[in-house]
Amino acid sequence: MNNIVDIIFRVLNGAGASSIIFFSTIIFSLPLGLLITFAKMSKIKVISYFASFLISILRGTPLMLQLFMWYYGPYYLFHVSFGLKWRLPAIIIGFSINYAAYFAEIFRSGIESIPVGQYEASSVLGYTNVQTFTKIIFPQMVKRVIPPVTNEIITLVKDTSLAFAITYTEMFTVAKQIAASKTTIIPLLVAGIFYYIFNDIVAFVMSKIEKSFNYYK
Amino acid sequence: MSLFEIKNCKKQFDGNPVIDGISFKVDEGEVVAIIGSSGSGKTTLLRICTFLEYMNDGEMSYLGKKVVTSENGIAKYIGQNKLSIDAMNNNKELTKIKNYFGLVFQNFNLFPHWTVLKNIIDAPISVEKRNKEVVIDRAMYYLKKMGIENKAYNYPCELSGGQQQRVAIARALCMEPKIIYFDEPTSALDPELTQEVLRVIKELANEKRTMVIVTHEMNFARDVADRVIFVDNGVIVEEGNAKEVISNPKMERTKKFLQKYED
């Protein structure tokens, strides 16, 4: 019994590291995603093509591979080594940029789903392009993208376990280490339960946010 | 001086002429109805008048101020060199001119995330920088006129189509425009709701507001408009006193068009 409590506490410790990856990625990838959306929707062809290219690379290659690139890349490309302290920044950069690409496409589809009449009404009333976006298009876009964004965020909770690939000690890494040293799968089950609970909370919070936009159709 | 004048307006979409040299004027206090079958170019004409579309050639002026001039057969908008919607949206000169007119759309195009009141007051406050209290007073006055002052704090989705269209009219009025354009304002409404919207437009006509109305409601056009313009294939086929043209058309094409409305 003591054994299980010990396992739970050690896995829970790893959950802290997972949360850091999770929240940092949310904080950085959402605005970065919007920026990539703007780039992709830009009237300047070069910028738009570059954004499309970036998105295709980020979505078209495994996230685990991208994490390796961010972690080992500086050494192999420039022969600079930041040592182990580079591990967390590399993970956060890798996750944020990867998720930004997915968010960018979600935001773009959200913006493009707003009826053209909204732009026209706004234009006739004399709003500038910036006002039209910030006051009229963006708030409506947010409502429309919440369900697909929720999907991505739930995936992100589980994807944080990929940091295990570069041996960052988040929840999954801890669970696997204990499992290996004690030859039991219980730590992995415990980790699984924690991921599930975490995602239940995420789904609950997101459904609250979604409901808070129900005051209009 | 006319409030609005357009001369020899031409518009092509991918080389196909949609408007092929249309000229007309709107004087102060006048109600002009534009009629014609679908695809005749009347909605495009209205979109050109309200800067939602650019013309390829022609001239346009508001209150005597030249907005578009014709240079070597190509339209030249003040304050911009390129013919594009984007350039027009960023054009400060045109934004000033937008003060002179309002537009009521077929599909209302209210902002769904804002209350009725916010829909009406936001542009006067944040675009025209008018005093908030004064604007709210005006908005409530217009909502009352439209018979929906009790809906000020509702969202558009809680209103019927007819009520939404009356909000859209109040929104246009609150900008205190010189001319109000209506683009088939009742086409998305059932007959009952159509009547309530037509009634408020008629009231505005009685107050001598200057209006240009694209419509399929012939009885309404005859009763409310001073002048009617019949557009077909991108040109004006016939125009004149509303009662005369609609009751007694001279051109064959107009007769044929109006016959469809007789039953």
Image: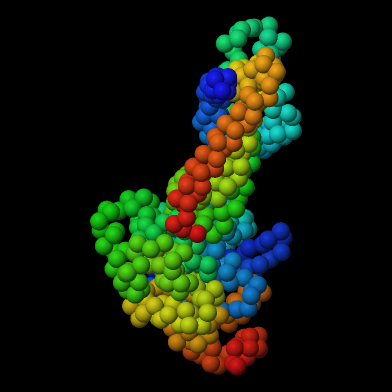
The image quarter in which residue A196 lies: top right
Point out residue B177 in the picture as x, y percentages from the top left corner: 38, 64
Point out residue A128 in the picture as x, y percentages from the top left corner: 46, 48
Residue at the (72%, 10%) spot, across then down:
A76
Residue at the (55%, 93%) spot, across then down:
B248
- Total labels: the figure holds 0
From the viewer's perspective, tell me whether residue B181 is left or right of residue A159. Answer: left
Tell me the quadrant of the picture where the N terminus of chain A can be found. top right
Residue at the (48%, 80%) spot, across then down:
B194
Point out residue A43 in the picture as x, y percentages from the top left corner: 62, 41
Point out residue B127 in the picture as x, y percentages from the top left corner: 38, 51
Q: Is residue A14 visible?
A: no
Vertical position of residue B214 compared to residue A172: above or below: below
Vertical position of residue B87 compared to residue A14: above or below: below
Q: Is residue A148 visible?
A: yes
The image quarter in which residue A193 lies: top right
Of residues B12 and A18, the one nearer the viewer is A18
Of residues B122 and A17, the one nearer the viewer is A17
Of residues A8 and B104, the one nearer the viewer is A8
The image quarter in which residue B8 lies: bottom right
From the viewer's perspective, tell me whether residue B28 is left or right of residue B7. Answer: left
Vertical position of residue B18 compared to residue B256: above or below: above
Residue at the (68%, 9%) spot, across then down:
A75
* Residue at the limit of the structure toward the front, as seen here: A1
